[in-house]
Image: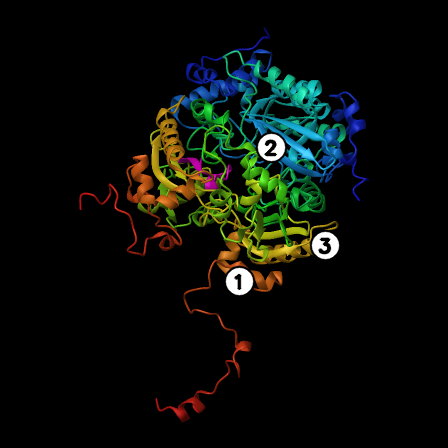
Amino acid sequence: MYEDNPGYNISEVLSNPYDPALSKKLYDPKKPMANRITDIGPPHYEQFFPPVIKKNYGKWKSHEIVEPGILKYTSETGDVCYVVRCGSPRLITTDLIREIADIADKYGEGFVRWTTRNNIEFNVDSEEKMRALVDDLKGRKHPGGSYKFPIGGTGACVTNIVHTQGWVHCHTPATDASGVVKAVMDELFDYFTSQKLPAQVRIALACCLNMCGAVHCSDIAILGVHRKPPFVEDDRISGVCEIPLAVAACPLGAIKPATVELDGKKIKTVRVKEERCMFCGNCYTMCPAMPLADGEGDGIAILVGGKISNRISAPKFSKLVIPFLPNEPPRWPTVVNAVKNILETYASDANKYERVGEWAERIGWERFFEKCDIPFTDKSMDDYRLAYDTYHTTTQFKWSVHTDNL
Amino acid sequence: MADVKKHDTPMVDDLKSGPWPSFVDDIEQKGLAGKQACLDLLGQLELSFKHKETHWKHGGIVGVFGYGGGVIGRYSDVPDKFPSIAHFHTMRVNQPASKFYSSAFLRKLCDIWDYRGSGMTNFHGSTGDMVLLGTTTDQLEPTFYDLTYQMSCDLGGSGSNLRTPSCCVGKARCEWSCLDTQQICYDLTQEYQDELHRPAFPYKFKFKVSGCPNDCVAAIARSCCSIIGTWKDDIRIDQEAVKAYVGGELKPNAGAHSGRDWGAFDLQKEVIDLCPTGCMYMYGDELKINNRECTRCMHCINVMPEALRPGTDTGATILCGAKAPILEGAQMSTLAIPFIRMEPPFDEFKDFVDKIWDWWMEEGKNRERFGELIQRESIQEFLRRAELKPIPQMVKEPRSNPYVFWSAEEVPGGWERDIKEFRARHAA
C-alpha cells in the first residue's frame, strides 16, 4: 500500500552517484516550498534484507550461539544464517561506515545490520563465509591497537554499553559518555568476548538525569549527576527564557519569581531555594540562564538491578547504590572499579539465569551492600514521589554487617 | 597529510589504547585525512576533560522549512579555539525499520555527510535514528534536499512531536517474534508523518515494537505506547528435542552459558523450578505445560529454543506510559490492551491511538509525558478516554485504600438531596 512512496524502491536513486550540485538547482531560499519533498518517511526496510533473510522471513525455527559473538539461525526451509556480532563505540565516522560497507560487500552480499545496543551484525549464509569473515574482522585494528570490530556481545556476557553523547556533543551533561564507556569496556573486554556470567548483564550510561540512554532499567547504570544548584544569570534571564516557564520547570517548587535591582534598574528574574534543589537540571533544560554544570560538583552515580525483559521476573527499575563518584578523565578509575566490583561480586555469587536485580532481591539488599562492600547511606533511601513503597515494613530482614554491632 | 591542525590532546589520546574500539583513533584518522572539524572536536573534548564540564552551548533553534523537528542546534562555547565546530548542528535521519542497510545506501549517506558535514555520526541515536553530527546552518536545507532526492530518506523526530518509531529484528531473523515488527514500525511511521515532523503534542511521544516479551528494544521501559508480541494458544513443544536437552545433546539457552562449567543440564532445576507460575511438569518422560496458567515470560523458550516455541495465535499486548525519571519519576508502561491483532491496516490499534492522543492533547500540560498524564488524571480516566474495560490484569493488586471516586450515577438516587428531609430524620 506504500508502493507510491519514493522510499519503497530506492535502487534507482542509489544507482546514481551523489550529485552535490543538485540541491542548489532545486532549493531556492526565496521560494522555500519549491521542489520540496516532505513526509516520505524512511525507505522501506525490505530492500535492505540480505537474500537469506528475505527468503526466510517469518520462517526461522531456532538458533544457537556457535561461539561468543557468532549466532546460527536455522529456518524451516533448511537454510541457515550465521550472524557475526561486533561491538562499536556508536560515535563513528563515515570512514568507518565505509569500511563496514566494504566488509558487507565482501562477505555479506552487500548487507549489514545494527542492533538496538549499537552492535554491528554481518549476516552470512554459510559457515565457510562466516569463518573467513571472522578471521578478517579480528585483524582489523585502529592505529592505537584497539579492535575495530571486536566479536562478542552474545549470551551471558556484558554486551555493548548503550550511552548518550556526554561532553562530545551535549549541552546538559554531568559527565562524558564515550570516554567513560571506552574506559569501562576496556576493563570489561573479557566479559564482552566470553559467556561466563550467570546471565546477560546490560550496562548503560546516561550523562545526565534526562537519560536519553534510558538507563533506568539496566543491570548496571552509570548516571551523570549534578550536585550544585543552578546559577541565576540576572542580567540574561529575561532575554533568553520566559520566567514563568523557568518557575514551572522545577518539580519541587524551589524556583520563585523575583525582582532585583541591577545597575539601578529593576529587573525580573528568579531565585532558587537551594536547600530544596535535587539537581535534576530541568530548570536549565528550560532556561539557558540557569546553568548548573560544575567540574567539582558533577560526577557519576551507580544504579543496579534493573531489567527490561519479562523473563522469570517482571521488568525492574535500577536502584541507586552509589550516590556519587568523581569525574576522573580520561580513564575514570573509581567508576571503572566500582562497576567491575559489582559485576564480579554478582558473577561469583548469583545462580545460573539470575539477573543482577533478581540476585540482589534473593539475597536481600542488605546482603548486596555487604557482599559488594559498598557503604550504605541515606542517599539510597527514596524521598521523592511514592517513596513509601520502597520502605521495609516487615520484621523480616537479614543480619548483616549493618546490624552486627548492635 | 591534508592541511589540518591537530590539537594537543594528551588525555583524550590516552583513550586510543586498550582493546575496545577507540572512538578517538577513528575520529583522529578522519581528521588527519582532511576534516578539521574532527580534530577540533577532539580538541574541545580535551578541554572538557580538563574542566570536567561541557563546552557546548544551550540550544539554538534551527531546522528545515516546514518541519518543527529533526534538527538540533548546537554551538561551541569556545568557537575561537575551535572554529570549525563553532556551529555543529545535528540532523536525525529516520532509519529503515530494524536497521538493516545495503552498502550502497551507507556509502551514499557517507558521500552526503562528507560533503555537507563533519563526517561524524552516531550510529545510532538512542531512539533509533541515524544521527548526523556536526554541520552549519547553511548546509541544513541542502542536506535535506540531498536526503530526500538522492536517498529517498526523511528526517526523524525531535521536540514535542512523535519520535521516530523503532522495532526489534522481528521475523526477519528471530523465531520468537509474534509480530511483523518492521511492518508495524514502517506503517506507523508513514501513517503519522505529520505528527512526526510538526510538533503539536504537549511533549515527546514514542512507539516501540518488540516481537516477544524478551523486549529487545526496551519498549516497556522507554515508550509511551509499547507494542509487544504475545500469543494466546499453547507453547509448541517438540518432545524429542526436550529429550535431547535432557540428554545433553543440545546446549541449554542456545549455548549462552558456554564460558563456565555449570554442570549437566537439569530440566527440573533450570526450567520447571524457575517457571514463575509453576505451570510446567514432567509426565513420564514428556514435558507438560498448563498453558492457561502460563504468563508467557519466555524463560523456558529461551532455555530450550529447539524444543519450545511460542504459539501461533499471535498478536500484541499494548502497554502505555513509560518514561525516564524526568520529571515525576521513572515509569514503566502499564498494561492497557492485553491482546490485539496487529495486521494491516492496523485500524483497531490506530483507533486506540487516536483516542489517547485526543485526551493527551486536550488535557496534557506543557512538557507532560503521556505516562505522567495517566498518573495525574488517574488510570480510570485513561480507561474511560481509551474506552477500555478494566480488568485485573491491569494491576499488580487491588488498591488498599478505600478512596473511591464514586460518581452520582453509580449511587441510587444520585447526589441531589434535601437537607430538610435529612434533618426531619435527624435533629441537628
Chain that bears disc 3: B
- Same subunit under labels 2 and 1? no
Label 1 neighbour load within 10 Å: few <14, some 14-19, many 20+: few
Badge 1 element: helix
Query: Does B383 appear above or below A40?
Result: below
Label 3 neighbour load within 10 Å: few <14, some 14-19, many 20+: few
Label 2 neighbour load within 10 Å: few <14, some 14-19, many 20+: many
List x then y, in percent, for residue B428: 34, 89
List x then y, in percent, for residue B303: 55, 40
Q: Separation of disc 2 and disc 3 at Cα?
A: 37 Å
Label located before the other in sequence (3 or 1)? 3
Image depth: mark 2 or mark 1 in front: 2
What amino acid does circle 2 point to? Glu
Query: Does A275 appear above or below B394?
Result: above
What amino acid does circle 3 point to? Asp
Residue A64: numbered disc: 2
Q: Quadrant of residue B206?
A: top right
Q: Residue at x 44, y 28 (%)?
A: A176
List x then y, in percent, for residue B147: 71, 30
Extent of the magenta region: A208-225
Badge 2 element: strand
Residue B347: numbered disc: 3
What amino acid does circle 1 point to? Pro
